[in-house]
Amino acid sequence: MKKYLFLFPVVLFASFVLLSCKSDKTFEIKGEFSSVADETLFLEHRGLGGIELLDSVKLKENGVFKFTEEAPENPEFYQLRVGNQLVVFAVDSIEKLQVKGDVKDLANTFSIANSPVNDQIKQIDSQTQKVKLQIDAADKKHAAKIIDDLTYLAELDSVLKEYKTEISKLILGNPSSAAAYYAVFQKVNDYLIFDPYNRQDYAMFGAVATSWDRYYHGTQRSKHLYNFTMNALKTRKQQEQQAALLENAPVVTESSLPDIVLTEVNGERISLSSQKGKVVIVDFTVYNSEFSPKHNIDLNKIYTQYKDRGLEIYQVSFDSDEHFWKNAANNLPWITVRDPQSVYSRLLSTYNVRNIPTAFILDREGDVVARVENYTTLSTEVGKVL
């Protein structure tokens, strides 16, 4: 009994020391939300593994609240959520954040006093939402045939370039900040806006990864970002090396169409002329379009029906977003290549393509036997050649 009585104060003292140490490393969020009516406010951590609930509070009539949590070892991301509304913010170690907002319109009224990095995150969210609205508007005009395929692609390209130009300045201004990290991982319609496999976009990932590895070396976020960036670099270098080996390789073709030599998803450059001996559907398309899913389903039916009889599909994408194309094309069973010039490609004028999709059918000698714009006739035309 004496033994246990002796240990009890020691345990209490140890626990007190641990709690004291922990309490010294906390951050605090104090705020006041208006228009509250028996609402519950949730504080959540936006970690690499997903959203984690940290705490919640029932808002009183005056809307005043306070949260205290353990401070992160590197800049971390959190969100305040009321119903289906949420706002994202960053915490840099030990901080006291003073926030305000109106629950009726939290996204537009939320503010954090004297927090430049969170002002930047709000700016990024605003710009990303603007891009989404512009892309959605272009999608609707294209679906309604108010604009043609090439105009649609040009609009998408213009919107993304403007966004990247503006946000790149923010990233390079302070690449070690939480805002820079947040910016490179922004998505529209579940696709990264900055493409880690694109040389110019990769520079943004590289700048942030290098800075975070320097200032927050060994932390979970820093290691994840560094590995993500290095894997993207390795993949791109492999693709560039393969392209360089084939860059000066002579291409001989007897086809009545100009030859095409472009890079497939796996980085291999494949020429249209290399398919001589097969009946080939040359399909000009865009994956980031409303028609694309059904289009590829219909193509797959034809491919499945005729592939054993010598049919091949050589599909040329004019998507400006390489990352989107790779994700969409990765599991297709035929040859999928992409022209990085997108809407400015000389192929479009060379092949006199004004509408996308457009297809050409080549016989086994590589000669054009049909041009197809009405794809309901494609299977019949292929059957004639086979």
Image: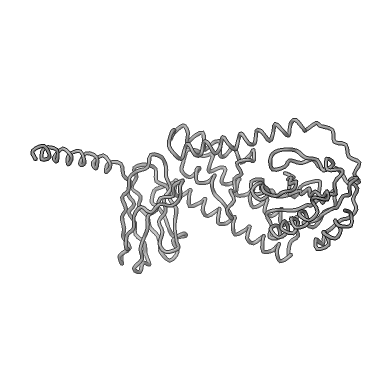
Colour convention: one colour
Quarter assignment of residue 40: bottom left
Q: Nearer the viewer, residue 299 or 383?
A: 383
Quarter assignment of residue 71: top left
Residue 192 to residue 143: above or below: above
Estimate the x, y position of residue 74 in percent, counting from the top left. Answer: 41, 40
Estimate the x, y position of residue 179 in percent, counting from the top left. Answer: 48, 45
Q: Residue at x 56, y 51 (%)?
A: 187
Q: Quadrant of the N terminus?
A: top left
Q: Is residue 341 visible?
A: no
Estimate the x, y position of residue 256 in percent, counting from the top left. Answer: 91, 46
- The answer to whether 123 appears left or right of 53 in the picture is right
- The answer to whether 113 appears left or right of 348 in the picture is left
Quarter assignment of residue 32: bottom left
Residue 190 to residue 5: above or below: below
**Which residue is situated farthest in the left direction here?**
2
- The answer to whether 54 appears left or right of 124 in the picture is left
Residue 151 to residue 215: above or below: below
Q: Residue at x 72, y 42 (%)?
A: 264
Estimate the x, y position of residue 346 in percent, counting from the top left. Answer: 81, 46
Q: Residue at x 56, y 39 (%)?
A: 205
Q: Residue at x 87, y 50 (%)?
A: 362
**Which residue is situated farthest in the bottom direction here?**
37
